[in-house]
Image (spheres, grey):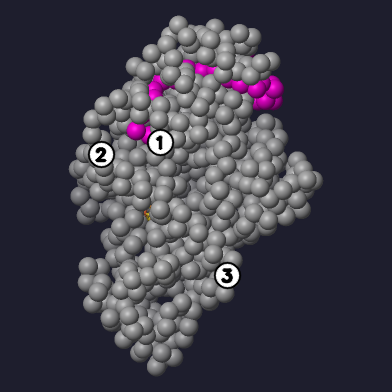
Amino acid sequence: MSGTFVGMPAFPQAAHEALGNAQLRRNLAHATGTIRAKRQRLVDEVNANSDWEALRLAGAGVKESALVDLATHLETLERTLTANGATVHWANDAAEANAIVASIATRHGVNEVVKVKSMVTQEINLNEALAAEGIAAWETDLAELIVQLGDDLPSHILVPAIHRNRSEIRDIFLSKMAAAGRPAPADLTDEPAVLAAAARSHLREKFLRAKVGVSGANFAVAETGTLVVVESEGNGRMCLTLPEVLVSVVGIEKVVPTWEGLDPLLRLLPRSSTGERMNPYTSMWNGVASGDGPQEVHVVLLDNGRTNALADEVGRQALRCIRCSACLNVCPVYERTGGHAYGSVYPGPIGAILNPLLRGVGHDDQVDSLPYASSLCGACFDACPVRIDIPSVLVDLRAQVVDAHRGGVPKAEALAMKATAVAFSDARRLRFGERFTGLGLRVAGRVGARKWTSARDLPPAPRESFRAWWKRTDGGRR
Amino acid sequence: MSARDDILGRVRAALAGVESGYDVPVAPRIADVPDLVDLFAERVADYQATVERCTGSDLAARVAAALPSGARVVVPDGLSVEVPGGVRDRGFTAAELDTFDAVVTEARVGIAETGTIVLDHGAGQGRRAISLVPDLHVCIVRTDQVVPDVPDALPLLAPGATEGRPLTWISGPSATSDIELSRVEGVHGPRTLHVLVVG
Ligand code: SF4
């Protein structure tokens, strides 16, 4: 039903197209600016009675401790989940995971499942795989519903429909809800509360009759065999509680070794994500609870490139990501291009490193262009609650892209960026590197590297360095 | 080879040469809070929930007053307060629960710093569905259940988790900001959260 990112043009071209869309840029600037301000207020609040940086260090430490002994923790998780009555499946890749979910649904004879917003099921294109088996996968998060009904692609991890304004949403509800279930009321206005009420009544019908629910998980606690889903609307609670059967697709990097390890993460995630002290609802469940919720519970542990990322010494840290989207909201490139330009469910700075790490470099132009979708300003690292040094990983990946193309005809962008990659190999030397970029881009212009430079929202050789411009103008907002 | 062995094998290969065991820095605590219950009430109210403080002898009257007249109310086993007209949960189906207007439950822990209520679905709290489907949730939290912050709550919740009980963390009524970032209270969960802090 909804589109996929397969066959998207490479970042420069997609970014160029997105830059021409004024509505998108305004929506995005408003969204990222608002969330950024809310997050900052809470960081200041934490610093008034505690220590945000120490909390980040603890959060990064919990995730790092999970990764360095990942095999052991996965075996523990399998054991505790099984003891709690869940059935554990393992999937090497998207096709295996989709086949497992489809076979569970088919075994129960259903032609529909209800879904909690989950990045991993988008990553594996689960909805399309289920559709091919004649099973409708209903997205129940309001933004995902808007995206799905509009036959559209999500543009932001947290607010996937941020590229749509209220009157567009009203039109989508009026024209598309009827075909998917309970129609929108004919007198629907474009008031957000009225639109939310229409979604409530449209989806309630589906929640009440659903036999099978599908979710991801934000965290999977190895020690206790607990899965955790963090959400706002209550659609997650509905999907996790009302169906008879629950299938959760969980990336192997979601493991948290101990129960106590949830602490820094549950304090960091909502503050970094929606800019709230705590999100409205967090659900935790331990396999099957007798007499409460689904009595058949499945967990699919998914690799799909995560072990590639784990093998990358510099890039490994990307697996600490808790998908808060703080790095998107501070990113000057993302704010101007939007999520679609990245051609992946993981947009923004984290997408620029995660996609190449998961899928490898050297065989897909779209993926290879992503490490260049950054000015290396470093704002993402400062915002990241688990201290992923995105700029350093970007630089390392650029070098890998260059290496992957060495021997053949050098690609234009590889030529243009090769020198900067060397200069940037230590992110702390950014100021030196930036002056170098100006030079690099001038060289690129001469050798005809139009592909990347022509899509940038910056003159090819800025008189002022990016960081100086960013500082002076507060990222173009002044 | 099974997918399980493939994946675990690749994980081990990827980490060859990486030192096992990572010392996790201790997460910082918040400074002492002079009045925990005040902070809890203030932070819950920040989420647009209704918060009232009352004494134990007042509780039944406050619960009754929080329920609209004529409302159909479902209550869990083991609820320590009498709810006039309250219907004991008999394992209603989701569709049957949808005919109730309100639910009254107790809680396991209140977290002051974040204004969060945690249910571990033990006695007086009921299974998850009853505090989810009705549109009004009246939730009773005792002052001695309020702790400063998340790291104080987790150890209290560990026994429930190891016994296999689910947990629901509630911070205000359900909400969305998906339409142009305008916050709308109430999508799928109870659109009204009424918290009675007792003691
Ligand atoms: S990389 Fe860091 S800031 Fe970006 S989404 Fe992941 S955890 Fe959040």
Confirm whether residue A268 shows in the render: yes
Which of the two marks, 1 or 3, is nearer to us in this view?
A: 3
- Name the amino acid type tagged 3: Ala
CA distance for labels 1 and 3: 49 Å
Residue type highlighted by circle 1: Glu
In the current view of this chain or complex, which residue is farthest to the bottom? A446
Residue on which the image places disc 3:
A22
Circle 1 or circle 2, nearest the eye: 2
Q: Do circles 1 and 2 both sit on a common chain?
A: yes
- Disc 2 marks a residue whose amino acid type is Asn
Residue B135 placement (x, y as % from top left): 62, 27
Quadrant of the displayed image that contains ligand 1:
bottom left
| Mark 1 closeness class: few <14, some 14–19, many ≥20 residues within 10 Å | many
Q: Name the residue that disc number 2 marks.
A: A49
Q: Tell whether position A477 is magenta.
A: no
In the displayed structure, would residue B74 be above or below residue A116?
A: above
Tell me the quarter of the image containing the N terminus of chain A: bottom right
Q: Do callouts 1 and 3 point to residues on the same chain?
A: yes
Q: Are marks 3 and 2 in contact (CB under 8 Å)?
A: no
Q: Is mark 3 within 8 Å of ligand 1?
A: no
Tell which subunit mark 3 falls on.
A
Give the number of the disc on residue A425.
none
Q: Are marks 1 and 2 in contact (CB under 8 Å)?
A: no
Query: Magenta stretch?
Result: B90-115
Q: According to the image, label 1 marks what residue?
A: A78
Q: Is residue A65 above or below residue A368?
A: above
Element type at mark 2: helix
In percent of width and height, residue A74 lies at: 36, 41
Q: CA distance from mark 1 to mark 2?
A: 39 Å
